[in-house]
Amino acid sequence: LGLRLNSVVNKTYEYSQNFAKSFPVGIEQGEFDSLTWDSVYIFAKACRTLLEKGHSADEIKGSLLLDTLLNITNIGVSGPIKFAANGARISHSVYLVNVVKN
């Protein structure tokens, strides 16, 4: 979270432009690599949003984090990122799940 948001956005754009070229010769791009990149980016963006709104790192969890994630939109490496109210990624087969520790 120490990265400035603009820096992360710029890096994401650069990464998306060079994604296929970023693998060494002989190493294939995995089918989930772009989803992993986007997942980490969206999670960091949600955390940054909450920190900028004055929440402490200890508060960033549960429904507060889930609600923030559901309201983030972005153009990621894997395509447009937007979530429906039920956590389903619109135009993609990815779901947000709120895991609760018992």
Image (cartoon, grey):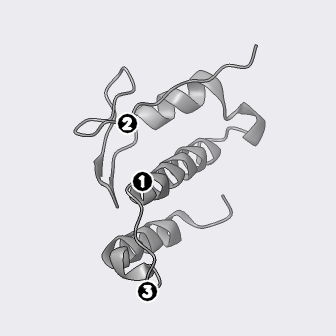
Q: Are marks 3 and 2 in contact (CB under 8 Å)?
A: no
At label 3, the amino acid type is: Val
Q: What secondary structure is found at the residue carrying circle 2? A: loop
The spot of residue 62 in percent (x, y) is 63, 24
Whichever of labels 3 and 1 marks the residue nearer the N terminus, that label is 3
At label 1, the amino acid type is: Phe
At x 47%, y 36%, the residue is 69
Give 51 or 70, whichever is nearer the viewer: 70
The spot of residue 45 in percent (x, y) is 52, 51
Horizontal placement of 36 versus 14: left or right?
Answer: right
Determine the residue located farthest toward the left in the rendered image: 91
Estimate the spatial distance between the alpha carbons at disc 3 and disc 2, rounded to whole Å. 30 Å
At x 58%, y 27%, the residue is 64
Residue occupied by mark 1: 32
At x 42%, y 61%, the residue is 30
Q: What secondary structure is found at the residue carrying circle 3? A: loop
At x 48%, y 68%, the residue is 6
Q: Compared with residue 80, is residue 10 higher up or lower down, i.e. above or below? A: below
Give 49 or 13, whichever is nearer the viewer: 13
Whichever of labels 1 and 2 marks the residue nearer the N terminus, that label is 1
The spot of residue 84 in percent (x, y) is 31, 27
User: Looking at the rendered structure, which numbered label has been put on residue 94?
Assistant: 2
Mark 3 surroundings: few (<14), some (14-19) or many (≥20) residues within 10 A: few
Residue occupied by mark 3: 25
Mark 2 surroundings: few (<14), some (14-19) or many (≥20) residues within 10 A: some
**Quarter assignment of residue 82:** top left
Q: What secondary structure is found at the residue carrying circle 1? A: loop
Horizontal placement of 46 versus 19: left or right?
Answer: right
Whichever of labels 3 and 2 marks the residue nearer the N terminus, that label is 3
Q: Compared with residue 21, is residue 36 higher up or lower down, i.e. above or below? A: above
Horizontal placement of 101 versus 22: left or right?
Answer: right
Give 63 or 14, whichever is nearer the viewer: 14
